[in-house]
């Protein structure tokens, strides 16, 4: 007997039991069969509800895990941004130092040229000044290379942060779409 039929048998029995004179007494065997079918359907519904609760708990656990992962990714992104900001400040400081060294070199060169002009210096003194000038130029070139290296590191860090942010955004979108 289908569940709908069993429910109808029990409704009819209840109407007869309450005194509906237009109805005949239902067959007790049909009433017993209807009760068995309805109890079986209730048991099935309870099992299904238990399975649904388990599935909901599973999805809730997945959601909480995804939220934790998103929080960790955000913390990593913030840490990378702080590192990037530190490197930018360091780069600016080194750039200022490089500019200061350039200014000092320019001033030394001008001074050396003026002294050479005024003193009509000999080749030994001139060679010494030229060697010193070359040393300062090499130092300035080293600073320039360091500045370019830091700039490349900053660009790499920016790309890494952007990649992490894109993955975080994509993960959040996927979670919202799945949930």
Image (cartoon, grey):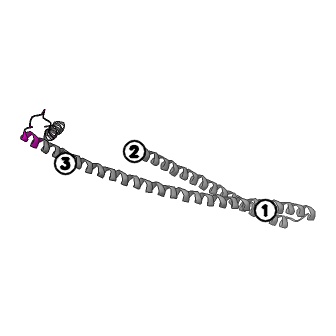
Give the labeled residue for mark 1. Answer: 133
Up-down: is 23 above or below 146?
above
Q: Secondary structure at mark 2?
A: helix
What residue occupies the far top of the structure in this picture?
22
Q: Main secondary structure of the magenta part?
A: loop
Query: Residue at image x 23%, y 49%?
Result: 46
Residue closest to the eye, 2 or 52: 2
Residue bearing the label numbered 2: 178
Instruction: Look at 69% across and 57% down and name the residue there.
Output: 144
Residue 97 x, y percent position in the rendering:
73, 62
Name the residue beneath numbered marker 3.
43
Determine contact: label 2, label 3, CB under 8 Å.
no
Query: Where the N terminus falls, by quadrant?
Result: top left
x then y, percent, for residue 62: 37, 53
Residue at x-position 51% and y-position 58%:
75
Mark 1–mark 2 Cα distance, whole angstroms, equals 67 Å
43 lies above or below 95: above
Bin the neighbour count of mark 3 within 10 Å (Cα to Cα): few under 14, some 14-19, many 20 and up: few
Query: Looking at this view, is 2 or 152 the one in front?
Result: 2
**Viewer-closest of 59 and 96:** 59
Q: Where is residue 101? Give x, y as percent.
A: 76, 62
Front disc: 1 or 2: 2
């Amino acid at each position: 007997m289908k569940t709908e039929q069993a429910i109808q048998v029990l409704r009819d029995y209840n109407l007869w039991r309450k005194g509906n004179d237009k109805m005949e007494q239902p067959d007790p065997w049909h009433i017993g069969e209807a009760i068995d079918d309805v109890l079986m359907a209730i048991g099935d519904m309870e099992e299904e509800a238990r399975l649904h609760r388990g599935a909901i708990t599973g999805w809730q656990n997945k959601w909480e895990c995804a939220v934790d992962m998103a929080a960790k990714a955000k913390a990593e992104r913030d840490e990378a941004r702080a590192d990037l900001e530190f490197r930018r400040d360091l780069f600016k400081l080194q750039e200022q130092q490089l500019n200061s060294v350039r200014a000092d070199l320019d001033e030394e060169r001008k001074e050396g040229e003026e002294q050479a002009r005024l003193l009509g210096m000999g080749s030994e003194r001139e060679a010494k000044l030229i060697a010193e000038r070359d040393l300062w130029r090499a130092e300035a070139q080293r600073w320039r290379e360091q500045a370019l290296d830091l700039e490349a590191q900053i660009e790499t860090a920016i790309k890494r942060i952007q990649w992490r942010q894109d993955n975080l955004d994509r993960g959040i979108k996927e979670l919202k779409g799945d949930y």
